Image (spheres, grey):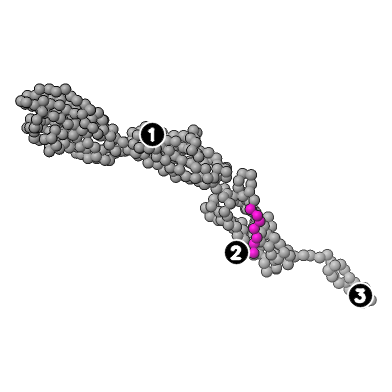
């Protein structure tokens, strides 16, 4: 910061040969938690006699530091250097700035019989931070994407949601909340219902604030997921007859998926996949078919179709006990006498 921006008119003091001038900065800026130096320099027209010097610093109307003819005292965290006073420097040092340190300051210099004052102001700044906890969504479900902004001061801030570089005007702000240290928090939320075609869109939250040299921005590609659904229409087979057991899986996104047939807990590697099909809404369908010819011993076996997908917290599965049926043939009655020429005994034989 340059000096000499505020020049107080010269006065003739009671100390012979001295002429008092005082110089202060109009304002200073300091980051929350950092140190600050409020400039106040003076010139008495010659060497400074500390026994004739009086210095007082005020924040609003409260005195926070003083030096009086060789003795100094100040509130915790504030100080004026006696060594620097000999060099005409009465600047006030603040060790750890808080929001309560912000405001108008007065530097009052007395030398001999005369007294002058300079005014300055301290502006406290705290840069905002942000977090975006949600970066994915399910299809066809209204989803809220909050951008949490916290720890900023002063309270004036501009927060914006963008999609692929375009501002989303329907986002909603929460009411700013004040923290115990005087800083502020707020949340900007964008809510919409995504489809599979929205996957990969670049969403970003942008913040503009006086404590930032340039806007703060965080972005991410939207991940859209749709949980698969399954149906197993065939749950029985005929003894010694080759039977296909399809597991239809549909409505999932993205397309990466693992579908498995198991029999009594063991994976059936001879299962076959249908070609992957895409639906008009961007989701996918496929069918995994397990084919075999059941025997009598297979009756009651547990067949399971199991699906793993990124939209599922745990695998989805459909299981059933296999029912095995038998082929039945119509029967005809044959009289033994018809075969041997005697007896009326009847035999039943399959037709």
Could you tell me how far apart the alpha carbons at marks 3 and 1 are, in whole angstroms? 106 Å
Task: Say if mark 2 contacts mark 3, CB within 8 Å.
Answer: no
Q: Is residue 274 magenta?
A: yes
Task: State yes or no: residue 305 in magenta.
Answer: no
- From mark 2 to mark 3, how far is it between C-alphas? 54 Å
The quarter holding residue 343 reads bottom right
Residue 26, image x and y in percent?
25, 28
Do tag 1 and tag 2 residues touch (Cβ < 8 Å)? no
Q: Is residue 116 above or below residue 94?
A: above
Which one is earlier in the sequence, the residue at label 3 or at label 1?
A: 1
Closest to the observer, 208 or 320? 208
**Label 2 Cα neighbours within 10 Å, binned few <14 / some 14-19 / many ≥20:** some
Q: Nearer the viewer, mark 3 or mark 1?
A: 1
Q: Which mark is residue 128?
A: none
Assign the N terminus to one quadrant of the image: top left
- Looking at the rendering, the stretch of residues picked out in magenta corresponds to 266-276
Q: Secondary structure at mark 1?
A: loop
Residue bearing the label numbered 3: 339
Residue position marked by numbered label 2 in the rendering: 267
Viewer-proximal residue, 220 or 319? 220
**Residue neighbourhood size for the residue with mark 1, other residues' Cα within 10 Å, grouped as few (<14), some (14–19), many (≥20):** some
Q: Are marks 3 and 1 in contact (CB under 8 Å)?
A: no
Outermost residue on the right side: it is: 341
The answer to which of marks 2 and 3 sits earlier in the sequence is 2
Q: Give SS at disc 3.
A: helix
| Secondary structure state at the residue bearing disc 2 | strand
Q: Is residue 54 visible?
A: yes
Residue 223: percent from the left, percent from the top?
A: 52, 47
């Amino acid at each position: 910061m340059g000096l000499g921006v505020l020049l107080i008119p010269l006065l003739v003091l009671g100390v012979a040969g001295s002429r008092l001038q005082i110089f202060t900065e109009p304002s200073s800026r300091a980051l929350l938690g950092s140190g600050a130096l409020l400039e106040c320099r003076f010139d008495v027209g010659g060497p400074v006699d500390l026994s004739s010097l009086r210095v007082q610093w005020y924040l609003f109307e409260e005195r926070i530091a003083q030096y009086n003819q060789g003795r100094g005292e100040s509130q915790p965290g504030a100080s004026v250097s006696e060594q620097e006073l000999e060099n005409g420097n009465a600047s006030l040092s603040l060790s750890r700035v808080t929001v309560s340190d912000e405001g108008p300051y007065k530097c009052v210099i007395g030398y001999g019989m005369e007294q002058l004052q300079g005014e300055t102001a301290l502006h406290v700044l705290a840069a905002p931070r942000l977090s975006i906890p949600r970066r994915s969504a399910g299809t066809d479900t209204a989803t809220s994407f909050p951008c949490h902004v916290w720890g900023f001061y002063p309270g004036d801030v501009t927060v914006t949601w963008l999609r692929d570089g375009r501002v989303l005007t329907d986002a909603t702000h929460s009411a700013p909340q004040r923290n115990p240290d005087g800083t502020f928090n707020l949340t900007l939320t964008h809510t919409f219902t995504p489809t599979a075609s929205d996957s990969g869109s670049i969403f970003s939250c942008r913040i503009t604030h006086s404590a930032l040299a340039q806007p703060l921005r965080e972005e991410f590609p939207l991940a859209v997921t749709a949980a698969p659904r399954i149906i197993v229409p065939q749950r029985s087979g005929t003894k010694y007859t080759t039977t296909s057991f399809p597991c239809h899986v549909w409505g999932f996104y993205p397309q990466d998926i693992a579908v498995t047939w198991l029999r009594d807990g063991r994976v059936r590697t001879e299962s076959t996949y249908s070609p992957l099909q895409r639906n008009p809404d961007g989701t996918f369908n496929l069918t995994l078919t397990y084919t075999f010819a059941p025997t009598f011993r297979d009756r009651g076996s547990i067949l399971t179709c199991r699906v793993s997908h990124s939209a599922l917290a745990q695998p989805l599965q459909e299981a059933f006990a296999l029912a095995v049926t038998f082929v039945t043939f119509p029967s005809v009655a044959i009289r033994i006498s018809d075969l041997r020429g005697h007896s009326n005994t009847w035999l039943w034989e399959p037709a």
